[in-house]
């Protein structure tokens, strides 16, 4: 994996892309995933919570991502629910009601598993004030270990999922040439009053609150490794200086899925993400069967990472989410 100047580029991509263009590779169906850009007020107006994947992770080790992950079959259970209906979410996400409910449930569940932040409350207009302590930690571990379904967790604690605390922000799909693929919805949400993000993800070695513009600058300096969906969503936050501004803007966000498009131009592979020209990569065959790569002229520091939760594009947990993002998303 190439990781220079904040870039991420799997060495196996060129061969897989060529196999796909020759009709020798059948794309894998993407799994549904969800990842959450958790927000709070920051020194410059806005801060977003990010997790750094452990360097030992086979996929995108060291990359920064958001909490998130794959939709689990148990996310399709009937959960205690408040806020926009499953049909309203289906209209927004472009899915069926049952699928939309599962995606929203996965977003809330994964955020709790990886950060301890819970978008749920004892009533439709309240939120849990504190999720610290050993009992809450035990529930998080049981959810991560698939020993407890999220619906059962909520019912036992007499809580309702607050779907109104989420705003749909973007959608990215892992490129067709990737062996593991995710169709990842990105959401935004405010950190509930009284709660705090906690350490605890087994797939991340660092969690941090960053100003979106500073995070982008860190990427450009080669200090923060990110994949295209992560960088693109960070940049889309930059025009907004407060959490309420972001949440209000969510209703206008375009959720058309972003999917990388590879094509062959002679011996050169041109890989592009529609609507995100800065990520375009040109990969040419080098001497001895190797390859050389260059970024789009418009973006010398652009990465060659995939979509995929956080991404999530294998998604996000910080783990899958980043895969899925591209954020077990």
Image (spheres, rainbow, N blue to C red):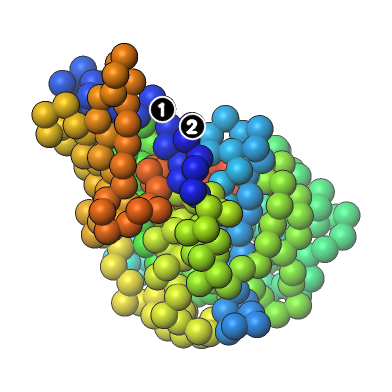
Give the Cα distance between marks 1 and 2. Answer: 6 Å
Q: Position of residue 55 (x, y in %)?
A: 65, 37
The relative height of residue 222 versus residue 211 in the rendered view (above or below) is: above
Question: Which one is in front, 148 or 225?
Answer: 225
Name the residue furthest top: 288
Residue picked out by circle 1: 11
Disc 2 is placed on an element classified as loop
Above or below residue 60? Residue 151 is below
Left or right side of 51 for 96: left
- Which of the marked residues, 1 or 2, is nearer the chain's N terminus? 2
User: Front-most of 105 and 191?
Assistant: 191
Residue 298 appears at what percent x and percent y?
27, 58
Indicate the quadrant where residue 25 lies.
top left
Going 48% across and 59% down the picture, which residue do you hit?
220
Q: Residue furthest front?
A: 287
Q: Which residue is mark 2?
A: 1
- Crowding near the residue tagged with mark 2, few <14, some 14–19, many ≥20 C-alpha atoms within 10 Å: some
Residue found at the far left of this picture: 266
On the question of residue 11 being in view, the answer is yes
Are the residues tagged 1 and 2 within 8 Å (C-beta)? yes
| Residue 61 pos. (x, y %) | 59, 38
Q: Please say if 148 is above or below 20.
A: below
| Crowdedness near tag 1: few (<14), some (14–19) or many (≥20) residues, C-alpha within 10 Å | few
């Amino acid at each position: 994996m190439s990781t220079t100047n904040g870039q991420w580029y799997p060495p196996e991509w060129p061969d897989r892309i060529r196999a796909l263009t020759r009709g020798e590779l059948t794309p894998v169906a993407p799994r549904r995933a969800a990842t959450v850009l958790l927000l709070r007020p920051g020194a410059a107006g806005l801060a977003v919570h990010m997790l750094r994947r452990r360097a030992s992770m086979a996929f995108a080790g060291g990359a920064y991502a958001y909490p998130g992950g794959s939709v689990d079959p148990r996310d399709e259970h009937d959960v205690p629910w408040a806020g926009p209906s499953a049909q309203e979410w289906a209209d927004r996400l472009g899915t069926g009601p049952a699928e939309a409910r599962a995606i929203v449930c996965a977003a809330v569940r994964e955020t709790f598993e990886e950060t301890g932040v819970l978008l749920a409350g004892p009533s439709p207009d309240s939120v849990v004030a504190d999720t610290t302590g050993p009992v809450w930690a035990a529930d998080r571990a049981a959810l991560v270990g698939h020993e407890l379904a999220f619906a059962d967790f909520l019912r036992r604690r007499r809580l309702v999922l607050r779907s109104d605390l989420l705003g749909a922000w973007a959608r990215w799909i892992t490129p067709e040439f990737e062996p593991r693929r995710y169709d990842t919805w990105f959401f935004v949400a405010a950190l509930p009053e009284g709660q705090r993000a906690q350490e605890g993800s087994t797939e991340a070695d660092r969690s941090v609150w960053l100003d979106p513009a500073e995070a982008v600058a860190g990427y450009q300096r080669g200090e923060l490794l990110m994949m295209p969906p992560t960088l693109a969503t960070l940049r889309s936050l930059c025009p907004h200086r407060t959490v309420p501004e972001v949440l209000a803007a969510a209703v206008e966000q375009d959720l058309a899925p972003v999917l990388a498009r590879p094509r062959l131009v002679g011996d050169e592979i041109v890989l592009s993400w529609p609507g995100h020209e800065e990520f375009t990569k040109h990969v040419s065959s080098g001497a001895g069967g190797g390859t050389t790569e260059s970024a789009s002229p418009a973006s010398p520091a652009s990465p060659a990472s995939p979509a995929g939760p956080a991404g999530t594009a294998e998604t996000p947990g910080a783990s899958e989410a980043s895969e899925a993002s591209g954020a077990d998303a």
